[in-house]
Structures are given as structure tokens and as C-alpha cells.
């Protein structure tokens, strides 16, 4: 009976600890700023904890030779100073300017003391911004007709993005960019158009976006081909509410971003109704290469089969997040682990501007040693923590995925983390707090196509509105064999 009571008490304690940890994380996420940065003082404290642990090991080993100090340079982990430009910055030169000259009245151009006329000696110039509200205009297409005794001929007009629609390319681009780049839901756009004296219903705009997605679908498939030519692809996923008439509540669909490498700078989103493995498996069916992601179990089958041709690359930032969450409950053990991870990122700061070959050489020389220290440290403290505690989960995640987490030191083209891909989810995360849900699975597919081109344009430093306006105008008559010219990273040189 005593043993049964002790086992029951341990289970209840574990469950209570899990609930308290979850509650603390939820409250922190709601009240506090979501930041995982560590200050210089914290890193110095972690370095002291690491040194103290190393001294304890040396004393326990009874006179072992002094090993190299892994905390060397820890005190130099000072944050980079941001350059602050003094004074007011000049206004952009590309903006349209209107010169307004202010002159003295004729009576003020005469001096009352010396009785002489004032002469002009120069001028003082100042600038300010003025906002011109957007406006709608109507383009009237007039096609002249000619006839003779046997035939009638009518002048042609350029093809429109949506046939038999009263929406031009610029209006379609405005609706798309407002929703998926500026996160402005259609019912708010409806009110804005009403202030301009135009009634455009949200249902009509929703239909426009679906038709634009269908029009751009061939270009979307070309972007997917460019993506699959990448040596490494980053991926992640996030949930979005989807209305379903068969259910009394909104179910959760998934948006999957796929981030190409530097030579193939495209971002392609995919939508699936569920988070099952079949979604990414179908999308990545023809891809062979490195796949960088978190430890989502749905990917495991891809990497276990060598014939599949996919190599797993882990995310150190995701691993670090586990240690940061456990920092509050066990600072003495989690602090040194975060210190070693900080040293790994210091190496990456220096490697960022290097070529892939030089980056690989630097990682093999420095990062490999730090990773070995980190792994030995985790193995050493693994038996000192409870398996189901936050610190236990952190170590279990790191050690279980160690091969994937350290694969970046084997190739200079790989990144230490998947942060670039995770940043592409921000547009979806911010947007869903405004437009709340997708109306159907087809709406999710529409959003994935349009959001792909917005994210790719932002990555290529191209204005999404200008890109959509031009491509929607030209794509219907553009040769299908040259569609790659219209992708955002190729579009700007074509225009130039």
C-alpha cells in the first residue's frame, strides 16, 4: 500500500508540475514580451555556473589536468551596438515634389531705416510630407467599328485579368495586397471603398481573389519547380481556422511555407485540411535534398527511407527554446547549456559574411568543439533531472535529434536554425487575428497561392502591388515556356 501511494503521489506531482508549467507559459505569453534574448549579465552568470561545475568535476577527478575553459570569451558576449543616426533624416528623393515659393509682400521689401529696397540674397528650404488619399477611376474602353458592304471589323482591346469583369489589374492588386500583405480583411476594405462612393461587396472581392489564384496557378507551379531545385528547403506549419458547413464549429487547417535557398529565392505556401503526413509528403514528392524543419513526427518516415532522398537538418533555435523555457525552473543546469548555444551563435555571426567553403572550415574548427562540450554536458546532467520536467524534455529533444541539429557543421550552405522559414509564418499569424478564418478549403488554397507571391516579392525586395498589377495584366498573353521570367526574383531585371 505504501509503494502504491508513493507511485500515485509521484504521478500526481508530475501532472501538477506539467499543468503549472503550461499555465506559466500561457500567462507569460499573454502578459510579457515574447523574447528569448539573454542579457550580458545573464551570460556572465551562466559562465560562472559553468566554471563552478568544471571545478567540481576537476576536484572529483582528483587532480586531472586542467581542460581548456569553454567559457573563455563569454564575457565578450556583448550585444551589437546599433548605430543611431543623429538629426532628422532627409525625405526620399523618389517622391513627387511640389515646390511652393513664399515671398514677402511688396510693402515688406523696403527698409524703413535706411530707405533702401531689400535685395534677394538666398532662400531657406524645408520639406514635409503630405498625404494624397487613394482614389478610384473608371477606364472607358472604346473599340471603334468599321464596315463595308461585306464585312464588319472592330478594334481589339488588351486582355483583362478576369474576363467580363469590371475590375482592372490595379484594383485586383490592391485587394490582394491589402488582405495578404497588410492583413486588411475584406469587410474593412468594403467600408473603405464605400467611403470613396463605390459599393464593392466582400463576396465580389472574394470571388476576384479566387479567380486571380486560378490565373496565377501555372506561375505557382513554376515557382514550385524553382523551389525543388534548391539544395536545402526550410519548412514549418501553422494552424488556421476553416469554416465547414458539416460542423457546428470551425476546424483547423494548416498552412505550410517552403523556403528556397539563396540561389532559388522563392517562398511557396501549401494548404492542407489537416496536419497529417500526407500533406507534406504529396507536396515534396519530387524533391531530393536537405529538408530543414523542427522535429515534427510526420517527417520521420521521409528520413528513415534512404531511397526517398531527403536528409534531415534540425533547428538549433527550436532546441534552444526548450532550454529557455526550463530556465526558470532550473537555472543552475539550463544556464550553462544556453551559454554554449550562445557561443555557437557567436561563431555564426562571424561566418555570415564568409563563403560556404570558409564557413564550413570555421564551423569544423570552432563549432564542432562547442557541440561536443554541449553533448557531453547534457549526457552528464541527464540523470540529475526528472524525465518529464521542462529541463528533462529539453535534454530529451536535444539528444534525440542530435544528428539533425549538428548536420549544419557538415555543409557550409546549411543554416544553424530555421528562423528564416519561421519568419514567413508571421504574415499568416498576424493576418489570422484580423480576417480570423478561411471560408473553405478552396479559400485556403487561394490564400496559399497569393501569399506565396507576396512573400517571394518581399524576399526579392519587389513591391507586391506593382508586381501583381503588371503580372495580372500580362500573364494571359505571356508565353507559357517563359513563365519563370515573371517570378518576383526574375521580374525586376526583365522590367529594367
Image (cartoon, grey):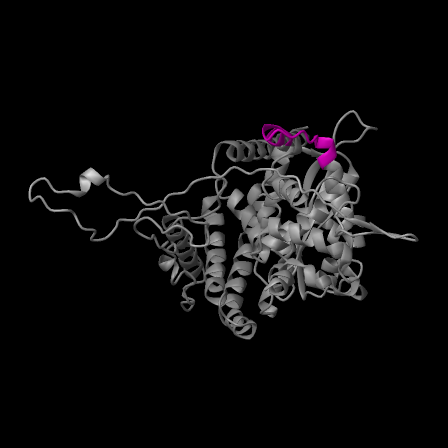
In the picture, the quarter occupied by the C terminus is: bottom right
- Where residue 451 sits in the image (x, y, percent)? 67, 47
Residue 274 shown left or right of residue 403 in the figure:
right
Judged from this view, the residue extending furthest toward the left is 114
Residue nearer the viewer, 146 or 305? 146
**Along the line of sight, which residue is nearer the eye, 495 or 376?**
495
Q: Is residue 145 magenta?
A: no
Rendering coords of residue 234 (x, y %): 65, 57
Give how far across and how far down residue 350 sits, in percent. 46, 66
The answer to whether 134 is drawn above or below residue 457 in the figure is above
Q: Determine which quarter of the picture holds residue 313.
A: bottom right
Residue 191 drawn in magenta:
yes
Res. 444 in view? no
On the picture, is 205 further left or further right than 429?
Answer: right
Q: Position of residue 382 (x, y in %)?
A: 57, 51
Quarter placement of the N terminus: top right
Picture quadrant where residue 490 is located? bottom right
Quick one: which residue is furthest to the front in this view?
149
* Any part of residue 147 in sight: yes
Q: Depth check: 215 or 323 in front?
A: 215
Point out the stretch of residues depicted in magenta: 190-205
Residue at 31 percent across and 46 percent down: it is: 126
The kind of secondary structure the magenta stretch mainly shows is helix
The relative height of residue 431 versus residue 466 in the rendered view (above or below) is above
Query: Is 168 on the left or on the right of 349, as rendered?
Result: right
Residues 313 and 33: in front is 33
> Residue at point 68% right, 51% down?
452
Amino acid at each position: 500500500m505504501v509503494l502504491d501511494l508513493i507511485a500515485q503521489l509521484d504521478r500526481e506531482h508530475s501532472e501538477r508540475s506539467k499543468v503549472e508549467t503550461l499555465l506559466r507559459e500561457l500567462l507569460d505569453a499573454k502578459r510579457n514580451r515574447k523574447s528569448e534574448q539573454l542579457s550580458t549579465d545573464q551570460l556572465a552568470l551562466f559562465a560562472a555556473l559553468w566554471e563552478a561545475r568544471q571545478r567540481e568535476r576537476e576536484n572529483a577527478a582528483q587532480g586531472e589536468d586542467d581542460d581548456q575553459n569553454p567559457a573563455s570569451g563569454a564575457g565578450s558576449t556583448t550585444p551589437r551596438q546599433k548605430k543611431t543616426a543623429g538629426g532628422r533624416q532627409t525625405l526620399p528623393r523618389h517622391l513627387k515634389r511640389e515646390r511652393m515659393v513664399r515671398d514677402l509682400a511688396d510693402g515688406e521689401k523696403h527698409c524703413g531705416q535706411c530707405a533702401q529696397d531689400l535685395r534677394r540674397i538666398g532662400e531657406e528650404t524645408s520639406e514635409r510630407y503630405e498625404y494624397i488619399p487613394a482614389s478610384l477611376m473608371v477606364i472607358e474602353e472604346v473599340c471603334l467599328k468599321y464596315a463595308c458592304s461585306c464585312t464588319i471589323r472592330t478594334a481589339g482591346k488588351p486582355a483583362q485579368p478576369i474576363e467580363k469583369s469590371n475590375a482592372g489589374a490595379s484594383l485586383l492588386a490592391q485587394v490582394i495586397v491589402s488582405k495578404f500583405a497588410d492583413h486588411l480583411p475584406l469587410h474593412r476594405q468594403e467600408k473603405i471603398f464605400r467611403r470613396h462612393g463605390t459599393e464593392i461587396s466582400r463576396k465580389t472581392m472574394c470571388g476576384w481573389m479566387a479567380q486571380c489564384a486560378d490565373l496565377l496557378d501555372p506561375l505557382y507551379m513554376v515557382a514550385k519547380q524553382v523551389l525543388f531545385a534548391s539544395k536545402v528547403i526550410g519548412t514549418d506549419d501553422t494552424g488556421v481556422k476553416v469554416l465547414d458547413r458539416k460542423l457546428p464549429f470551425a476546424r483547423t487547417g494548416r498552412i505550410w511555407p517552403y523556403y528556397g535557398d539563396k540561389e532559388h529565392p522563392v517562398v511557396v505556401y501549401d494548404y492542407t485540411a489537416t496536419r497529417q503526413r500526407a500533406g507534406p509528403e504529396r507536396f515534396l514528392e519530387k524533391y531530393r535534398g536537405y529538408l530543414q524543419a523542427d522535429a515534427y513526427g510526420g517527417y520521420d518516415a521521409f528520413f528513415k527511407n534512404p531511397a526517398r532522398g531527403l536528409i534531415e537538418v534540425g533547428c538549433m533555435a527550436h532546441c534552444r527554446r526548450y532550454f529557455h523555457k526550463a530556465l526558470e525552473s532550473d537555472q543552475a543546469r539550463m544556464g550553462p547549456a544556453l551559454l554554449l548555444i550562445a557561443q555557437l551563435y557567436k561563431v555564426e555571426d562571424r561566418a555570415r559574411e564568409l563563403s560556404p567553403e570558409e564557413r564550413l572550415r570555421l564551423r569544423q574548427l570552432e563549432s564542432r568543439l562547442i557541440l561536443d562540450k554541449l553533448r557531453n554536458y547534457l549526457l552528464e546532467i541527464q540523470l540529475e533531472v526528472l524525465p518529464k520536467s521542462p529541463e528533462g524534455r529539453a535534454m530529451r529533444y536535444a539528444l534525440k535529434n542530435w544528428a539533425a541539429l549538428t548536420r549544419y557543421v557538415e555543409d557550409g550552405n546549411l543554416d544553424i536554425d530555421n528562423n528564416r522559414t519561421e519568419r514567413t509564418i508571421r504574415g499568416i499569424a498576424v493576418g489570422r487575428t484580423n480576417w480570423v478564418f478561411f471560408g473553405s478549403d478552396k479559400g485556403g488554397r487561394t490564400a496559399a497561392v497569393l501569399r506565396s507571391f507576396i512573400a517571394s516579392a518581399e524576399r526579392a525586395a519587389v513591391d507586391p502591388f506593382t508586381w501583381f498589377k503588371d503580372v495580372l495584366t500580362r500573364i494571359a498573353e505571356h508565353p507559357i515556356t517563359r513563365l519563370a521570367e515573371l517570378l518576383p526574383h526574375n521580374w525586376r531585371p526583365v522590367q529594367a
